[in-house]
Image: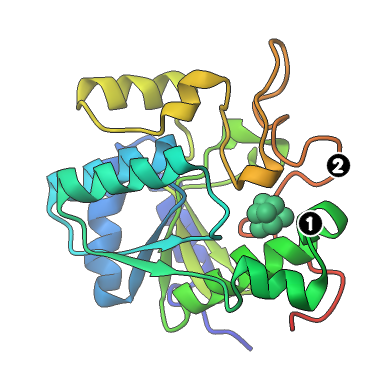
Amino acid sequence: MTTAPLAADEIDELATDYEGRPAEELLEWAAERFSERIVLTCSWQHQSSVIIDMVSRLQLDLRIVELDTELLFPETYETRDRLIEKYSLELESITPLRTVQEQAEDEGPELWSRDPNRCCYLRKVEPLLRAIDGMDAWVTGIRRSQTATRANARKLEFDEARGVVKVQPLVNWTDEDVLAYLFAHDVPYNPLHDQGYPSIGCMPCTRRVRPGEDSRAGRWSGLEKTECGLHAPSQQPTASSG
Ligand code: SF4
């Protein structure tokens, strides 16, 4: 059985306490509370830019990790590089166990088009498990307004399956809050957000959204799938993780 690094009622009380407080206060508290056992993962979307800027301004000593599927847009990698340069980031890059080519040899080409849950497991979820191995807390940039599955997310939650406290400082932020922060602090952000991509993932599974569509309509378009499995562990691979 997994032991929570904080008791469930304590997590609940803290989540309530921090709900109305600035994101920076939660980050500061979490960095001190979990010390060297906390990790921030970045996907290089808007939220990553905001949190990186906050971590830098607050001078928090946080382990920062990117989960690089090796299938991201060139603009996403460029955004990462701009943030590394501006903030002198010490970034740890975690990649899948197999390259895209090796995966194609083992599983057949374009696994994402045949079994996206398995592809996401191999290229996102398994690397995440390595990223949080030995950690007590995981900082993520998810927001309630992004999807129905995130609508009840809280500032602090215990991810029972993985045994970490999720620290979600932007969970109650709106799109407008995010943009206001980025412009106010002159933070580099992914230019695809200005080109019809409110949500950005891997190239094969992300398209522009059309006017009137949901902000996540461009992710796994045409499929039932709405989450990669990082934040919704119920979407599991359909075969062994290999
Ligand atoms: S988003 Fe698509 S390409 Fe990326 S890991 Fe998931 S299924 Fe594979």
Q: Quadrant of residue 162?
A: bottom right
Under circle 1, the secondary element is: helix
Task: Where is residue 141? Give x, y as percent.
Answer: 45, 46
Query: Would the CB of label 1 be found within 8 Å of ligand 1?
Result: yes
Is residue 19 visible to us here? no
Q: Residue at x 31, y 49 (%)?
A: 26
Is residue 171 visible to us here? yes
Task: Where is residue 132? Give x, y as percent.
Answer: 46, 74
Which of the pair 79/143 is nearer the observer? 79
Q: Work out whether mark 2 precedes mark 1 in sequence or the reverse, and give the earlier one.
A: 1
Residue pointed to by mark 1: 116
Residue pointed to by mark 2: 223
Task: Where is residue 133? Give x, y as percent.
Answer: 47, 81
Q: Residue at x 69, y 67 (%)?
A: 121
Image quarter hosting the C terminus: bottom right
Q: Is residue 170 above or below residue 198?
A: below
116 left or right of 99 in image: right
Q: Amino acid at mark 2?
A: Leu
Q: Residue at x 23, y 43 (%)?
A: 54
Under circle 2, the secondary element is: loop
Which coloring applies here?
rainbow
157 left or right of 92 in image: right
